[in-house]
Every structure is written in C-alpha cells, then in structure tokens.
Image: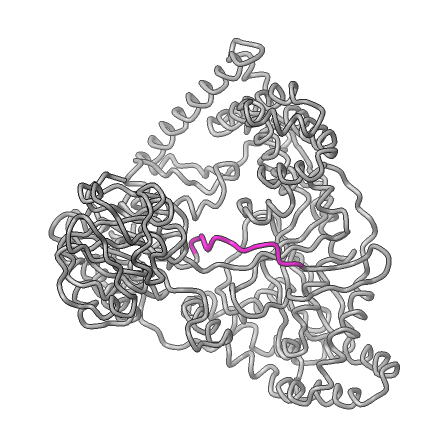
Amino acid sequence: MASAPWYHGSINSTKGIGSGASENACNRDTAVALRRLVWFDDLRSISFFPGALGAMLLLPDKSAVRSEPRHQARFCGVPLRRALVIEKAETATVEDPLDHGTVRQRSRDRVRCFRSNLPDVPLARLLQLLTEQRSNGASPSTTEAALRDAARRAAADRQPWSKAETAVLLVLADLSAEGWTLDVARDAIWMKPPSESARTGETPAAAKARLRAPREIARQRQLAEPSVSKFIARMHAPRRHGTSKVSIASLIDDGTDLARALSEISGLPSAERAEKLATVVDPVVEIVTSANRCLHTGLYLRDVWRYFRHTWSLEYRPTPGRNLQVIVRNAARPNAPVMGIAALTNPVLNLENRDRWIGWNYEALLARLRTAPQCWPDVRDALVRVLEEAQGEIRCDDLIDTANAFEGEALERNLAALEHAANRERAAALRAREADPDSRASAKTLPRAVDGEVDWAEASATPLFRAKRARALADVLSGLRGLERAPADGVRLLAELKRDAELDRAIRLALRKLRERGLASRILEVNVCGAAAPYRELLGGKLVALALATAEVRDQYRTRYRHSPSEIASKMAGRPLVRENDVCMLTTTSLYGIGSSQYNRLKVDLGGDRVIRWREVGETRGFGTIHFREETVHLLRQMSIAKRGHRHVNNVFGEGTSPLLRQIRDGLSALRFDANDVLEHSWTRLIYAAELYPSARDDLLFDQCTAPALPSMAEVAQAWRDRWLSARIARPDILARVATQGPATLEADLITRPSEPTLFEHMQATDGKELLA
C-alpha cells in the first residue's frame, strides 16, 4: 500500500473501528494489521459505502481521525472533500486510488474495485449509466436490465471496442442479477456482493428464497431452450408400452393415494407399523447406463434421470469425467415410482476445508504431529511410498535423455528448462492452429496405434504432457531428496522444519501427491442428491444420501471403471494405467450456506463398525462461475483468445482443472477485472463428508486400504423407515402436503415462464452475428 502523507500525524481512532470507538490509540502497524485503509478525494456521496465498509471516518485535518457512528454515516449525503474509509470486514481486497495498486486479502462481503481499460467514449457511457442508476435508487434488477439494454446497443455499434464493451456490460449485468450493488467513485466501479447471511428480521427460509431467485431465473432460461423444452414434451407425451399407455408421469407417485396408504399405517403399534411400512415404501437402487431402460415404461433410464434433474432449483449441466447416476425407486408401489436421484462424480480438486479435515493440509498435518508426534514414521513412510509410486508412473526415458544430467539438483533444473521449452512449443502450435481454422483437428482426439488401441506413448509426447511430465518428475525427485534427511522422530521433525526450507517443501510436495492419489481413486463427489415429489416431504433426500454409501452403489462403481484407463495418468505414464477404485469417502456441498440441509444430523448405526454418518466439515469460499450466463461466457472466451492470440483452454484432459473457470478468468483479466474479485461470488456452501467406514480418514492419510463390507440398500432402507419415515407419517400436516403432490405438480413446475431474449437471440434476430463468432 502506498505511503500517505496524512499518515505522519497521530492517529487516535483506529482501534475498535466499526463499533463506534473513537479514542483508543494504536500505532500505524497495528492499524494496518487490523483494517485496510483507503483514501478518497472529493467523494461525492458516502451513502453506498457504510453498509459495505462499516464506519466512515472523516478527516477534519491531517493529525487526527474522528469516527462517525454508522447510522450517521449511512445517511450522510453531503459532499465530502476527503474521507478515510476503514473496512469493517476482517480481511478485504481494496484498491488504493493514490497508486492504483491492489492490496489482497480475503473477505466475501468486501467491496471490490474495477477500473476498466475501455476507451474513453464507452467508459464514459458506462460510468454515466451506473451513476444514473445509483442516483435514481435503482434496484439491482433494474440496473441489470439497463446494463443488458446497453449491451445490445454496444453489440450493434460495430466499433473496434464493441466486443470488449459488450463483455464488460454483460459481466456487470450478471453480477447485478445476483444482487450485487454497483457504484461509481473516482472513475472506478465499486462492486459489493449481496450478503448470504439472513438479513435483520429475515427467516432462514426467506433468505434461501432470496438466494434461490437468481438460480431459478437461470433454470427457467434453460427450460426455455428448444432442445430442453422438446425433451420435456417428449417425456410427457403418452406412448405405448406393452398393453398400456405410459409416460414419465407413470413414474411419479400419486401423492393422494400414497398419503392415504401411509395414514392407515400411522396409527398402528410400532412393531406392526414397521412391518406394514415396508409393504408401502420399499426403496431400491437402480444404476443408470447408456442403454438400460425402465421395465415399467420402456423409457431410457438416462432420460428418466435427466427429467427429474430438471425439477431441481439449479440448471442442469452434464459433468465431464467419471460419473455414476443413481435412481432410488419405490418397489412397493405401482410402476416403482422414482423416490429420488443422485450422481457421483470426480471430487472437487481445490476444497481447502475438506483437505484440512482429512489431514492433507500442511498445517493440519503439523497440528496432528504436535499432538501425536509418534505417528510421524507412518506418515513419512506413506509420503515416500506415494512419491516412489508417482515416479514409477511418469514416463521419463525421453526426459532423462534430453536433460543430459542424471541426478540431484542439476537434473531438476534441466527438467524445469524442458518444461518451459515444451510450454513455449505448445503456445506456438496453438497460435498457428488459431491462425489456420481449416487445419484445426480436435485437440481431444487420442492417437491410435495400428491395432486401433490408444497409443499412450505418442499421447505422452505432446508438448502439453512433456511439460507436465518434466514438472512432475522434478517435483517427485525434489520431494524424495528432501524426505531422505527427514528425522525419524516427530518432535525432532517439527524443530527441523523451522530451519530447513527444503524439508518443508518436500513434505508439502509429498502431501500434494498424496492428495492427488486420494482424489483420483478414493473419494467421490455427490454432485446431485435429492428426493422427488411427493417423497420430499417424507425426507426422501436423507434416504438418497444414505443409499450412496451402500454396497450396491460402491460395487457398481467398481464394476463400471474396473478396466478403464485413467486418461491423464496414462498420458503421464506413456502406457495404459488403471486406477484402483477403492472408494472410502463421499463428499458434497449444500445448495445454500444457511438454513437446514438434508445432511444435517444424518447418521444411522447398523451395528458394529457399520455406521453411515454425514458430517459438516467446513464451508466453501464461495468461488466459481455459477453466476455467469452463457452469452457472457462466450464473449469472455473471445476476449481470452484475443488477449493470448490463441485458444489457451481447449477442454483437454491434463490441460488444467475446470476449463470453464480458466476461460472465464482469462477473459476477465483481459478486460482488467480482478478475476478473483468477480469469481468470489459470496455464495458459500457447507461441505459435508461421509466416511464409508470409521478408519477412512486414516486410510487417506497413511495411503492404505481397509475396505470393509458396506451395508446393503435393504438395511439402509429399514433404518431410514425406522428413524425418519415413521415419525413423518405420524404428522397430519406432512401427509396433507404429500397428498397435494404428484405428476401434475411436477409438470407445472417445468412450465417455462416468458423471459427477455438473451443477447444471443437478439443478435441472431438482427444482423450482428459477427460479434458472436
């Protein structure tokens, strides 16, 4: 942060900022450590900043600071010549207008600054639009509409800056659609995300509804897509199967009839009630494949799963990579109606709180060693074993020959040089490919040998994978070299780490490899899990979450991928490499960070060590791309290509995590947005994890496999009926809600509502298609 001339005097009101305290003195270092300071000259109005930043401090002179109470500052609209803003948030990212630099810290509720690199003419239009919106007290939704109108005009303007201007307007419109507040000060745009916490007087249910509103808009847009609306209409259309006419409605239970059957059971003695319940609700698991059909309707199960997924509050997008879709059905009812659906996929790679809970985080490992230093030898053995196995899975013959050095730091330096050379070669090839569209072959196509099998050796020789192999081998060798001199005693290790940077780095590298191995084959992410109507009211979501931890699901996953080579690992090895699928943990995130979740208090004890328990292990940072529309993403991709001169992200396995995130980050940077500012959308989620057996976390940390027998679906279904279903059917209000749900309610939920045309639709209807090219 730039030094400020006004800071040479005494500061008398920095301690306790935000609480109204004004006379507690502290020195400059303490002040900067507590809060970030931002200097504004000639700020027109501070009505926007108090809710975002907390206290507003007025500077009557350069030797003292006076703290104004928040309620006074909030309504202070008089022009101020100078003001010192001190952020209320614990940490923040703000820009210092004195030096145009950025001070980075973390806070989801912080204000973010955007200084556009647009030319003067479009920049002036943008700032004027936002200033007028703010002066008129426009809501975020009104501001969004104004920004989208401006984007349509900019797209039709055909100026050299039209594409960049349109992209900026669409990014800001998408943020406004999420409830972000936008304001203008000192020729910069200040952006603040909505608070995820419940507002004063707001119930958790109301807060969820507020957070759900933007998601519902995106879902409605998807339902209106021609391909989606045709699919839903096809699922609703009656068709003949055997001697009956059926449709997707045949797989949606009649809530009235179900409620009547459950009501008759609710008054029975507990022992008899448990027996009778199984004759009305008998959950079974069905795994979706590309070819299997429903026995009762003839519909493809993949279509059945997709239909019910469209009834979720989030729009549906297929997930790349390994995937197992699950349907839970009630075998005791006519046509075995769908009770709920789920999907297992590759775990999220960067989830700090999950990794800390498992023990993969460096600080978490040190904390464990401080309390149990005797476990260090086992941890060290696991780290060395993982590095040695990783070395054996890297094709290195060509690397060693080229590196021309065979040991120690010299080899590692030469490998780093090989990595840089391969990256330069790849960038040149991508630029040439972009310049000659006719020569573009799919970057995803795998080379084939004469016998038709994938030629993994050739796939490993591409510039992308030469760079990855050189980097990975250098890291592995460095890690092994550092761990060689690690002391065997845990107490001595902790002391040594304070002065041995190479040992510290080696442990971090080995932990990363251990984490990569666990995420590749030991953990699955639950990215879809929930109940279908009318079973939502009966806590069917809890049943589905428990069903994923059964032997049937684990065995089906093992069978599906038992002989499937891992594409990235095989390219790294230069030969087919099949990972063991010894899944020991499931993880997921809630839809919202507030209110109740189906994973709360979700535990069943089936005897012995067979306990299924979902537990909360932290929260996400609220970081991602969920708040950007398709048209915005498209233009950001174009900005990324224009910036680099080639298509840097080609959706190729091994290129990097989350292609969409990297494309958007590149495009935002090209527009001079701080990508982290915009991608950190403040919509945090709770992280949940379920160990499939009690020692699962230790297995992940010590790189071992216990793999005990898991409970069956029948056992889980019985436990769910005893623990939750019996209590729910005893409540008349619950059964009354069940009775109102059925095929008609789901069909009504999938009816699209009219919406404004997107920029894509507007441009395709006019003559501005070249902007979208």
Side of 279 relative to 250 (left or right): right
The x and y percentages for residue 362 are: 58, 37
Camera sees residue 223 = no
* Occupied quadrant, residue 201: bottom left
The residue sitting at 22% across, 72% down in the picture is 137
Which sits in the foreground, 274 or 63?
A: 63
Instruction: Give the vertical position of 76 relative to 247 (above or below).
Output: above
Camera sees residue 498 = yes
The x and y percentages for residue 453 are: 63, 33
Q: Tell me the quarter of the image containing the N terminus.
A: top left
The residue sitting at 63% across, 54% down in the picture is 587
The residue sitting at 38% across, 56% down in the picture is 89
The x and y percentages for residue 3 are: 23, 39
The residue sitting at 57% across, 69% down in the picture is 307
Whether residue 366 is in magenta: the answer is no
Instruction: Give the vertical position of 716 relative to 334 (above or below).
Output: above
Side of 106 relative to 364 (left or right): left
Q: Give the magenta part as a residue range.
A: 615-625
**Residue at the extreme right:** 271
Side of 401 relative to 130 (left or right): right
* Occupied quadrant, residue 388: top right
Instruction: Give the vertical position of 517 relative to 628 (above or below).
Output: above
Count of picture labels: 0
Which sits in the foreground, 610 or 449?
A: 610
Side of 262 relative to 194 (left or right): right
